[in-house]
Amino acid sequence: MLSVLQHPRLALDWFSTTLLRWADGGLVIYDRWLINANGFSQWSGRGGEVLLDVYYSCYLIAFIGVLFFFGRFRKQGWLKVQPEVPYDALLLAMIGVLAGAKTAYIFIYNPEFYFGPPPYGPVNAADQLQRIFLNWSGMASHGAVAGVLLMALLWWLKSRPPIAQIGDVGCIAGAFGAIWIRLANFLNAELYGRVAPADLPWAMRFPVRSGKGMQVVQHQGELFEKMFKPEKADQVEGWMKALMDANPGGVIDRGSYVLYRNPDAYLQGYELAVHGPQGVSYLPEVPRPAGDGRTLFFDVNEYSLVTTPRHPSQLYQLLLEGVLLLAFLLWFRKRARRAGMVSGAFFAGYALARFIGEFWRQPDVQFQAHGNELGTVFLGLSMGQVLSLIMACFGLGLMLWFSLKGKVIADQTMWPPDTKKPATTITPFEPGTGGSSAAGDLGGGLEHLRAQLAVKEAQWDKELAEGKKSQSAPEAEPERKPEDPS
């Protein structure tokens, strides 16, 4: 190994992805500083509700991209919709992405955390509701896509918008959003890659977590999960009892947290991280006592676990599913004649990029077992690859359908149609042609004024011609009354 990079969580003691947190003492900034009525102070606590972190911020940037692309293509005339439509699309996209991604993660990837028994499952109903509605740590991209499709279908059934072309813009915005979501995955040190070859210069170590997201440590030659106790005091006793019942002899109480023997951690390649006088040392195994009976300086009770050098697969996916896919869709949009083609290209392209990226991505630990260390689920494919194949078929089907049945983009009309046009009246001046308000467009106002004057001049010419004609006609003699014979 020429060199091994360290993830910021390992290399920088001050690194945190939590930007704002609300704790009992007040508002916490960057998990460092506490703000309350007493002013600023150092914060060394834990817990509280996360208000804003890097993950949420990246989602926010992705949603801003929806407004940007809708507004840009509308102004260019490629998307013929009224100004309020992009905001409707943004609201529906937010609901579909957040609800769909969370639902898919709950029921496909980690149902035990939300519905299973303790120690991993909720302690009571209140804890369960908090995990479902306040814990957004788990999101599944395939669920996000399904959620957006459902919202699009409901929108089409209700209002009959040009959903195919709206979907085209939404898919371009989705590729833009994928860039930021994968960046969030990297900063959170999650979804890292498989073991990297010895000569890969950008191989990287990541902190090791269990399949439930807990930090993994080694104690006396065994692997444990570092699990913090519930914040609410009334939940601690029941939680501890559940731990003891589920893993007799495998729970070590450390005060604010416990060490819980992890029977699945053997499936992960790891090294030991030790902070010693010479800095951080990375060891393949626990060091043995020296021959003279003295122990080494890094012989400690708990060793932090880090991965062996891995592929930073989050950055690979950022390029594949984000940058390259976005560039392809922008190029393809200029050549697509029918609405819906860009959407089909997105689903097929994203599925291909995800399928390729899975070859470097660490398998989901939920599906790993003895003899199946790669966590494959069907014909040697991971869960992500299986779902990607389904998505690819869906995308190719969309492209075939819209190539035959899709509406020509150039023939699209404005939606919704403007049915509230005011009655036309001839006025000497229009807003924007002068006056103290200077409202409206000056050039457009002058053009409208010229048109009105032309109509007025034509009317005057007609009246003048009719007047001259009446003057040139011979004057009719007055009608004579018959003479009285008497």
Image (cartoon, rainbow, N blue to C red):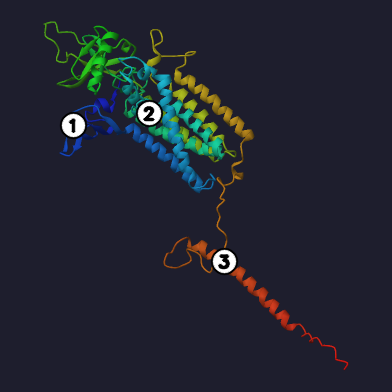
Q: Residue at x 72, y 80 (%)?
A: 470
- Most distant residue in the front direction: 486
Disc 1 is placed on an element classified as loop
Q: CA distance from mark 2 to mark 1?
A: 32 Å
Q: CA distance from mark 1 to mark 3?
A: 70 Å
Q: Nearer the viewer, residue 479 or 458?
A: 479
Closer to the chain start, of discs 2 and 3, is: 2
Disc 3 is placed on an element classified as loop
Q: Residue at x 88, y 92 (%)?
A: 485
Which numbered disc, 2 or 1, marks the residue closer to the eye?
A: 1
Q: Is residue 454 above or below residue 73?
A: below
Q: Kindly tell me whether residue 195 is visible in this rendering.
A: no
Q: Quadrant of the C terminus?
A: bottom right
Which numbered disc, 2 or 3, marks the residue closer to the eye?
A: 3
Residue type pointed to by label 3: Ile
- Most distant residue in the bottom direction: 486
Closer to the chain start, of discs 1 and 3, is: 1
Q: Is residue 402 above or below residue 10?
A: below
Q: Tell me the number on the disc at residue 315.
A: 2
